[in-house]
Image (spheres, rainbow, N blue to C red):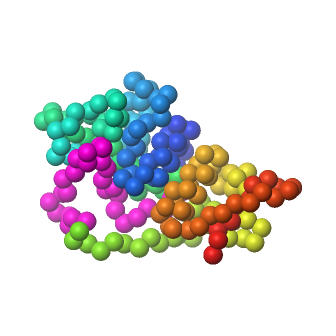
Amino acid sequence: MTQLSDTQAVILSAAAQRDDGNILPLPGSLRGGAAVKVVGALLSRGLIAETVTDSQTKADAALNRIWRNDEDGRAILLHITDAGLAAIGIEPEGSDTALTSANETPHAEAPQDTPRESDTAPKPRTRREGTKQASLIAMLRAPEGATIEEIMAATGWQSHTVRGAMAGALKKKLGLTVTSEKVADRGRVYHIAD
């Protein structure tokens, strides 16, 4: 299993929740050399990737959606890869080229040898058995449900990753309805409504 620092897990979890998969904006406390170091580590491990766009939009710290510009002035965006999704326990879709936007969407150029998104039918999400996401779903489908603490103990995730997986992977990506209720002796218990 891929070991991630807390900062890396937060960045990847946030990117997984975004429709465009963009890892930007980074957390507000991560700037300058620290941001370059964290992004460099994620790039070198293949958990995120750069996408060169045809846009000449300049990298702007205020917008914080464009990582940098290449030598031709084209915007370079950062997005989460399938390996990055797998590292946080989310089953990746068919392609690891989730393209991103920078407010006024610069469109990435599709490689010549691969069909464009409009040419291919969307691939249905499949769930693998034995993954952390599968165990999360099983815990939430159990009659007694699960608390954040119980899920943390079973998966090894931190609380923000558990919440991110429920909001991003389960609700947005898989379309499941996650409900919660306050139980006297256990606290807040989460369930998947069938």
Which residues make up the magenta segment? 89-117
- Report x, y in % for residue 110: 20, 57
- The answer to whether residue 47 is left or right of residue 171 is left
- The dominant secondary structure in magenta is loop
Q: Quadrant of residue 40?
A: top left
Is 98 located above or below residue 106 in the figure? below
Q: Is residue 12 visible?
A: yes
Residue at 47%, 63% (x, y): give it: 173
Question: Which residue is rendered at x = 73% and y = 51% of the image?
Answer: 149
Q: Residue visible at 63% across and 49% down?
A: 157
Question: Which image quadrant is residue 185 in?
Answer: bottom right
Q: Does the rendering let one see residue 140?
A: no
Q: Position of residue 180 (x, y in %)?
A: 70, 60
Above or below, comparing residue 176 to residue 6 in the picture: below
Quarter of the figure with residue 176: bottom right
Task: Tell me if 25 is positioned left or right of 144 in this view.
Answer: left
Question: Is-magenta flag for residue 36?
Answer: no
Tell me residue 74's x, y (percent).
17, 39
